[in-house]
Image: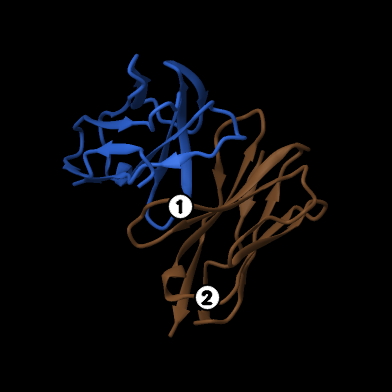
Chain colours: A brown, B blue
Amino acid sequence: AQTVTQSQPEMSVQEAETVTLSCTYDTSESDYYLFWYKQPPSRQMILVIRQEAYKQQNATENRFSVNFQKAAKSFSLKISDSQLGDAAMYFCAYSVNRDDKIIFGKGTRLHILP
Amino acid sequence: DSGVTQTPKHLITATGQRVTLRCSPRSGDLSVYWYQQSLDQGLQFLIQYYNGEERAKGNILERFSAQQFPDLHSELNLSSLELGDSALYFCASSETGYGTNEQFFGPGTRLTVL
């Protein structure tokens, strides 16, 4: 069964510093997609970044980047120059190409310290 | 604003009752997904519809059912409600229903069962 594990229930980072959120997943598929979603206090689910498993290059979106290690089944999210607005719950998620549902991890709550 | 609308925003009801949650997908999106987020948990996939047909089923209870109508809006029916059904219910939509397409999430319906 496909699973997504986020081992850090909570993390804190000083404003303007860099923080890395960890995620591992388990799958026997070779083609799949990985995502990081942000859920602020408003509870809205916001896609932060996505990675196609067939692409070796790590995805980047402004201050957000990932470290995708396919062999290790690891998909960490790095947030650079942390801002107060980054405070949220972050969910790592997975989707198989031919399947449609997204499987979510339990989340990491990120606190930004001013 | 993702373009996905969900009504109502909040719903408070009693055990044993039945409720209907409604979702309107983004214009042009054919696929609708339903997810359940219990307190401090990740999202759990419930069910997916594509252009009116059920496409995939997750851990959806037999007391729950859904449908997608010809105008592509979807309804999630929850019956014989229990305290444990209290959760945030998200609807998401995507263009084709395959994992390659981004799922856009609605703001959610918070269900409280007393």
Of the numbered discs in the image, which one, if any, rests on residue A82?
A: 2
- Whether residue B28 sits left or right of residue B88 in the image: it is right
Front residue (pair A50, A104): A50
Residue at 29%, 38% (x, y): give it.
B6
Expressed as whole percent of the image width and height from the top left, the position of residue A6 reads 60, 60
**Residue found at x 68% / y 50%:** A25
Q: Considering only vertical position in the picture, is A54 above or below B71?
A: below
In the rendered structure, are the residues bearing label 2 and label 1 in contact, judged by CB atoms less than 8 Å apart? no
The residue under the point 70% across, 39% down is A32
Answer with left or right where residue A94 lies relative to residue B61: right
Chain containing mark 2: A
Q: Residue at x 42, y 16 (%)?
A: B52
Image quadrant where one finds the N terminus of chain A:
top right
Q: Are there few (<14), some (14-19), or many (20+) residues within 10 Å of tag 1?
A: some
> Does A68 sit above or below residue B8?
below
Label 1 chain ID: A
> Callout 1: helix, strand or loop?
strand
Judge if badges 2 and 1 mark residues of a common chain. Answer: yes
**How far from the left and from the top, in percent, is residue B110?**
27, 47
Q: Quadrant of residue B16?
A: top left
Quadrant, the C terminus of chain A: bottom left
Q: Amino acid at mark 1?
A: Ile
- Residue A111 percent location from the top left of the image: 46, 75
Report the label total.
Answer: 2
Looking at the image, is mark 2 or mark 1 earlier in the sequence?
1
Q: Quadrant of residue A42?
A: bottom left
Estimate how packed mark 2 is, as few (under 14), some (14 to 19) or many (20 or more) residues with alpha carbons within 10 Å.
many
Where residue A46 is drawn, which disc sits there? 1
Give the residue at the far right of this rendering: A71
Against B70, is A11 above or below? Answer: below
Q: Is residue B87 left or right of residue B8?
A: right
